[in-house]
Amino acid sequence: MPSWDELSRAGRLIVWLNKQVGKTYKLGAEAKLADVAFDNPSAFSGMSAWDCSELVQAGLWAVGCQTANGNPVASFDPAWKQYGLSRHISVKTAISLPGALLFRQNNAKCLHQIGHVAVSLGNGYVIEAANKKAGVRVGKVDAGFTLAGKIPELYT
């Protein structure tokens, strides 16, 4: 298995997110980016709970992305903002691209109604801070994901 330094940032993100699986879901959970070393595979080890967008934001920081599509990762929260600041791609592409973001929209007419984000594993599955019952988990991509985005910095 490659070392942390040998992985692409997208690969690092998947590894880091897998370390979060099993943790609790908590709406509004906040990780302090400035308090954690940038590009640290052990980043946020003290967090016991995540919400969906904070999990993505902290994961990007932990794998060395200070920017997301040219925007500061520190401003990359909540989910609707993550979609707005990502490079938009098709859901079909995102499903097969490890590290791509998949979004659920509560109201198709309003960007601010994006209520959930998950990270594609590239094989029809996602890692997500799903809900209070499931917590952070690996699950199948379902029809509820109608929008997708890519963070170019994960692939450079």
Image: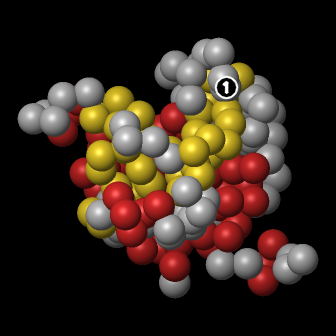
Q: Amino acid under label 1?
A: Gly
On the picture, is 33 further left or further right than 1? Answer: left
Side (left or right) of 145 relative to 11? left
Left or right, 126 with respect to 18, comes to left
Residue 126 coordinates in the image, percent (x, y): 58, 49
**Which residue: 65% across, 15% down?**
133
**Is residue 36 at least partly visible in the picture?**
no
| x 29%, y 56%: residue | 85
The location of residue 124, given as percent across then percent down, is 55, 57
For label 1, the crowd category at 10 Å Cα-Cα, with few meaning under 14, some 14 to 19 and many 20 or more, is many
39 w.r.t. 147: above or below: below
Q: Residue furthest left?
A: 109
Q: In this view, does 79 lie above or below 150?
A: above
In-front residue for pair 63/8 = 8
> What element does badge 1 sit on?
loop
Q: Quadrant of residue 120?
A: bottom right
Name which quarter of the figure residue 30 lies in: top right
Residue at numbered disc 1: 135
Q: Position of residue 135 (x, y in %)?
A: 67, 25
- Quadrant (top left, top right, bottom left, bottom right) of the N terminus: bottom right
